[in-house]
Image (tube, rainbow, N blue to C red):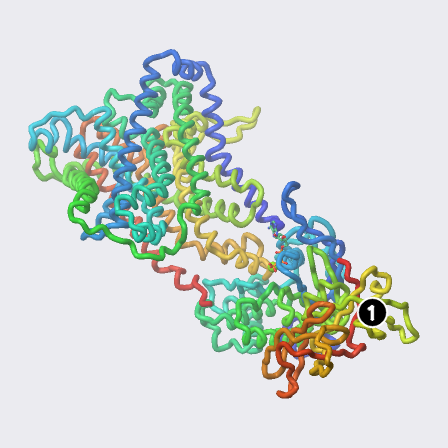
Amino acid sequence: MKLDLITRIVLVCTIAVLALLIIFPLTNILITATHENGRAVFSSIFSSPVTRQIIKNTVLLGSTVGVLGTLIGFLLAYAQTRLEFRGKKILHIISLIPLISPPFAFATAVIVLFGRSGIITRDLLGLSPVLYGYPGLVIVLTTSFFPVAYMNLLGMMRSLDPSLDEAAASLGSSKSKVFVKITFPMLIPGIASSFLLLFVESIADLANPLVIGGDFTVLSSRAYIAINGEYDVAAGAAYSVVLLVPGLLVFLLQRYWAQRKNVVSVTGKPSGRVRNIESKGAKFFLLSIPFAMSSLIIMVYVTVLIGGFVKVLGVNNEFTLDHFSYIFSGIGNDAIIKTTLLALIATPIAGILGMILAWLIVRKIRRGRELMDFLGMLGIAVPGTVLGIGYAVTFNHTTKLGEFSLIPQLAGGGAIFGGALAIIMVYTIRSSPAGQRSGIAALQQIDPAIDEASASLGASGVVTFKKVTLPLIRGALLTGLMFAFARSMTTLSPIIFITTPDTPIMTSKILSEVDAGRFGNAFAFCTILIVLVSLAMSAINLLVRGRSIESLSNPLN
Amino acid sequence: MATNSLISIAEGDSKVRASDSSRLQLSNLSKEFGQDPDRTVAVDNINLTIEPGEFITLLGPSGCGKTTTLRMIAGFENPTFGSILLDNQDISKLTPDRRPMGMVFQSYALFPHMSVYENVAYGLKIKKLPAKQIEQEVGFVLATMSLEFLANRAPNQLSGGQQQRVALARAMVMRPKVLLFDEPLSNLDAKLRSQMRIEIRQLQQRLGITSIFVTHDQDEAMSISDRIVVMRNARIEQVGEPAEIYRHPKTVFVADFIGRSNFLTVEKIQSKTKSGKIAIKVLGKNMEVDAHEDAVTASNPVLLIRPESIRIKRSHSKNQEASGTQGRVLNVVFYGAHVEYEIETEKGNLVAVVSDPKHDEIVPVGQMAEFSFDENRAWLLPSGD
Ligand SMILES: Nc1ncnc2c1ncn2[C@@H]1O[C@H](COP(=O)(O)OP(=O)(O)OP(=O)(O)O)[C@@H](O)[C@H]1O
Ligand SMILES: [Mg+2]
């Protein structure tokens, strides 16, 4: 189709926005990393045992979390699709909670529960394990990220045609043989991609290594130290480039798999009934880990909740509102309002950007749609640490083109709007991929002839988008935005590099409370954050339900 | 205001309509998809003029380029080459929303989040007509299409036929200069299909809108069109009125695609007789037949005889061999209104349809039958492809 003028303008503007929000900062990071100190980092990969140890640590951590998280996610998905038991729905919901948790909730609660002077380890069991470092990180990151694997595998296992299992079983294979020979091979792509996703998520994480990492330094925490401790931007950039490589590789692999997905999911409509496993012993074995996991999650949440209302949890369990009044009276107040406000500003922008991208990709451009999709998704494919450092090196000063100042200083002290703009930009580019993905999925289900009908009735591309496309994908959009908002509110790694005293952000405030050992304040902060996120999610949920188009999008014939 | 509305057109006299209708010309229109190793030529150098108010059908087998041609006219595909003229103005550079075309889609493509009324009003709202006028025009169209009682329904609460009527109303209310249909009836059952095509045809004639209708159903094409364009492999094979295409096909492909055909090889040809016909010898008989101009010079012309032109009689000859105009009945199917025969002759098998058959005249399977046909009903055409 010939693109009309307005659509062309939209296309150009979108590319410009992406260039500003992600391409420019990433390019800058690459350039900065090639400065002298950056080059030193690269060569130290080969020469310095310290740097090599950091890389080894990173890979070790990523692999462990990848394996454990995938295993747990798999058991949970298996239980959901192939087992019948009480509490199935609740188990599902609990399994998703970590997706929207503030980053410190787990780390802090785990220290309080299982640390050297932990409530459970010392008070109940009389142990004093060393939690800081590798073991603590594995526990916390696995708990935080296994839901990613769970969701991934759940979708895949649901789409597997049970009639295949049935056919095999009716040919005389025993259940375990059916699983090993039929089900498992079909899940291998899902398992592999889950592992890779978890690997990348965990090496990209910054919050937990800072809180519970101890001496176990990984690339992200090393980059943080380089910038915030040693003020060596080039070295920080170089570390994050090393971090960027596996992130992007996995992202590309993941896309490659997603394209071949229809080979795996045989049909959209499973035709047989799933044969449930009846044996009590097998059930108990398969369910023990999922239930242990969800108990841990509940325990963590209870700890966070109670921890905010007592003096020092486990030491002085006297009820108090001190933590909350500390937060609401001081700088915390400001952080709550500003964080929420900035996330609220960014979310709709991200939603619109994501939807426009989806629309351009699915409906408007033929050549280069792969590239466009890739650029749009970069915001999430790039580790938060890398993005944050990219923003810091790019927007901490005015960008000049010769004598002419092209972009004013957006981040850091003295920036316009106190650096709020850079934070909104980060939230936007981190959130728009969620809108883009759900938009693409929704658009692909809408008959392209509907767009064409609108065009032949005289509507330009943009009018069609506004009057036809957008109303039809609103549900998907809002759901995507719900997660995007939660993500913005709880993200730390990109923010920590660009937050300023003028723009206090909750997550970075929580970090300073944890750093100072004031766990009670941190818990209270987390509770407030969780409440805010839940409120926003319920509000959006109501909106979606109120205007559902499902009842309209299903023609008879 | 009202002079430009659908209402005034519908109520106006036929002269107004004719002068108001548009002529559409496709010249050297071509479309290629893809790059060189796997390049597809979907439309290959098509030239066609559609007269004002005419109803044209594009007919052809799957993949011959009908949809692509239509989509180029609507503006959804860019021609690789060639131009599209509407009333002598080149519109091929315009985006779809700037072209005065209405399109009716195979999938109806109703807006699922709007009621029937809103669907029909959509285009007029985009045009920013006054609310009063929109109400009038939509009301009128809904009434014309007997859709008033459905005005507040959502598309998913309609039957397939009703959805198609709404789609038609939605296109019609814009008073397009050209109406485009891409297999609009193919999702309907047979009965509704024939009813809808009558409705479409009547409405089109009443409003005098130049129309292009894509189908691969020959009955549909025959019953609805002023002229049929038979397409094959991205090219136009023949253009003509339905009767012309049926009786005087230019090629074996057209003859075969439209209706059923018997082809007989011709033994001897003589050039034109005084009556303008061609003298030939076929099945041992001399006759004079009408012929396509290329058939005279063609190396191997064939004679087309439609099954309904063949007469069948029980043979009383002692000779039980198929020879001359005698053949063995291989198959007989009784349909009530007509009987269909398959007959083995020395020139190959023939299909014959005899209508209103008397019971005792039906020749049973295995018997010899004498067949004949009226030379005025035969048509000589070149066999080469
Ligand atoms: N977007 C496209 N990209 C590549 N090839 C295409 C595209 N659209 C159509 N074609 C090819 O062009 C040729 C003509 O297609 P077209 O859809 O016009 O056929 P059609 O006559 O409408 O067939 P049908 O009766 O099956 O609808 C086909 O070979 C088809 O594969
Ligand atoms: Mg077609």
> Relative to A216, is A7 on the left or the right?
right
* Residue A366 in sight in this render: yes
User: As displayed, is residue B14 above or below residue A495?
Assistant: below
Question: Based on the displayed image, in which of its 4 quarters is residue B309 positioned?
Answer: bottom right
In this view, the residue farthest toward the right is B274
Q: Chain of mark 1?
A: B
Q: Residue at x 27, y 26 (%)?
A: A210
> Closest to the observer: A172 or A302?
A172
User: How far across and down, in percent of the image, does residue A480 sit?
Assistant: 38, 47
Q: Quadrant of the C terminus of chain B?
A: bottom right
> Closest to the observer: A16 or A295?
A295
User: As displayed, is residue A530 above or below residue A196?
Assistant: below
The amino acid sitting under disc 1 is Ala
- Looking at the image, in which quadrant does ligand 2 appear? bottom right
In this view, the residue farthest toward the top is A47
Is the CB–ligand 1 distance for label 1 below 8 Å? no
User: As displayed, is residue A337 above or below residue A542?
Assistant: above
Q: Quadrant of the N terminus of chain B?
A: bottom right
Mark 1 Cα shell of 10 Å, populated few (<14), some (14-19), many (≥20)? many
User: How far across and down, in percent of the image, does residue A323 sit?
Assistant: 17, 36
The residue wearing badge 1 is B291
> Relative to A397, is A289 on the left or the right?
left
Is disc 1 placed on a helix, strand or loop? strand
In this view, the residue farthest toward the front is B318
User: How far across and down, in percent of the image, does residue B112 sit?
Assistant: 47, 63
> Relative to B136, is B261 on the left or the right?
right
